Image: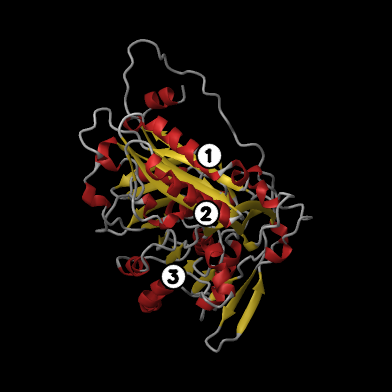
Amino acid sequence: MDPRDNWRADSRGIRPVRIANCSGYHGDPPREMYNQATLGDVDFITGDYLAEVNMANNAEAYAQGKHNGYEETAWQGFLETIDVIADKRIKVAINGGALNPEGLAMKVAELQRGEALPHLDSANRHVTLTSESFFFTKKDREPREIVSANGYLGAHAIYEALKKGADIVICGRASDASPVIACAWYWWSWNNTSYDELAGALVAGHLIECSAYVTGGNFSGFENFELDRFINPGFPIAEISQDGTCVITKHGGTGGMVTIDTCRSQLLYELQGNAYLNSDVKAYLDGVVMEQVEEDRVRVSGIRGAPPPYTTKLAIFYKGGYELQALFNATGHSYERKAALFEKKIRALVGNDVLEDFDVLEFQRIGVPAANPMNQNSNTVYIRIFAQSTKADALNAISRAVRDVSLRHYSGFHSSLDLRAMTPRPYIAYYPALWRQHHLKERFHFINPDGITKSFDTTPPPKFEDLGIRDSYETKPHVETQGNLQTVRLSQIAHGRSGDKGANLNFGLYVQTQDQWDWLRS
């Protein structure tokens, strides 16, 4: 052990490490950092403050000196909690530094934010385009202005900062689970090739990274419980053992719950196939096992690890142009024909020449009226116009067309009098790409009270390997579907969780019994 670091010397590397999460995105209450520090004993507090678009939304204001660059809720959490953290000697690792980790750091280790913008160019062979984003580079348009470009960083720099004695590590765009991996890695002194253990910590980090999503938030099975349990769910804790297995729990007396189902829901969130990726390790989930060992305690095991992929995600945000949306109501019968009439009328009034200027123009039908409505509300659906264009005046043509409909609207037409969302506003577009990990130059910095900074290079992963093709399975029938059938809600058989990864959407389902599984995969 480094003689400079005798922190938790009587228990580090002996008992499971307790890692608490205090944030799943920048909107979570700052008070949760204080709650995690005071409602029970923990060794580390971690927090994820960055959704995909946070940094892009603030990039221009930060460059103009109008924004601090870091997440305000992270700062507020420290203001409330710093004395408790110091008194209880709790170490903290969060990515709330966002664009400006240095600005949030004093007497901390700061993980350089992986800024990739200077290296973005058309000749870079490591930028992978997606077809949905090709209007980003259409030849007949002016180039879109890049707002931010950040590579997703792994755990090794955080781990090395902790190893050198850091008490608080403020990161920029570290990936969501990386602080948890780093804390467990440091606690157990794993090697950087301890792939099974690192993979277990990756899954533990994934389970707690979204705060209350594993303790009852966004839980499709909520209807089976008293609603009061979901008013204020406590935030989660991962107890990670030396072999990488973990127990997901929360402080006693807090709201919500930790069950196999809440854990399975969060496990499926943002997954794409049976391999979960991080910059330090891949986690294979085929053999994952979850056991309810006590109330609000779920053990997770069976994770296999492997070397990480050669690439990491590069999140590019650019000025996409302008957008608007507007909601209009349709009450009464034949709502589909009313929506079709409304769309034809708006398109005709806008005109074909202007329609060519739209990147996106959608007329969405939201909701279905009740079969036997007893009042106006149950017999009303929405028609949502959503439009994007590089030309604000093209969007203004939508507003003019809506005005010109005037009294020529369909029967049962009504809307809110607040139409501010129909005013064109600039929007930031997202362009996910890949970046070779060996091109990332990561450093961490110790900032002393006198403001002197000492910087250190990090040790990259020793090995990379290709991901390969994800496993896929045939859904050949496993049960007989002839005979007496009945219609039930899918939620009576399965629970689910939807999410996103990069520009992809995903939706995971799980069931309770083998019979249900055989039916579902048929």
Mark sitting earlier along the chain (2/3): 3
Disc 1, SS:
helix
Return the residue at label 2: 396
Dot 1: few (<14), some (14–19), or many (≥20) neighbours within 10 Å?
Answer: few
- The nearer-to-camera label among 2 and 1 is 1
Q: Which residue is mark 3?
A: 74
In the rendered view, would you say 511 is above or below 500? above
Identify which residue is drawn at 55% across, 53% down: 198
Image quadrant assignment for residue 63: bottom right
Badge 2 amino acid: Asn
Say whether disc 3 or disc 1 marks the residue closer to the N-terminus.
3
Decide which of tag 2 and tag 1 comes sooner along the chain.
Answer: 1
How far across and how far down the image is residue 83, in percent?
A: 37, 79
Q: In the figure, 509 relative to 207: above or below? A: above
Q: Is residue 48 left or right of residue 453?
A: left
Most foreground residue, 54 or 172: 54
Regarding residue 164, the answer to whether it shows in the image is: no
Residue 472 on image: x %, y %: 58, 31
* CB under 8 Å between discs 2 and 1: no
Q: Residues within 10 Å of mark 2 (few under 14, many from 20)?
A: some
* The furthest residue to the right: 123
Q: CA distance from mark 2 to mark 3?
A: 39 Å
Please say if 452 is above or below 281. below
Seen at 41% across and 13% down, the residue is 480
Q: Residue type at mark 3? A: Ala
Where residue 348 is drawn, which disc sits there?
Answer: 1
Q: Three-letter amino acid code at disc 1?
A: Ala
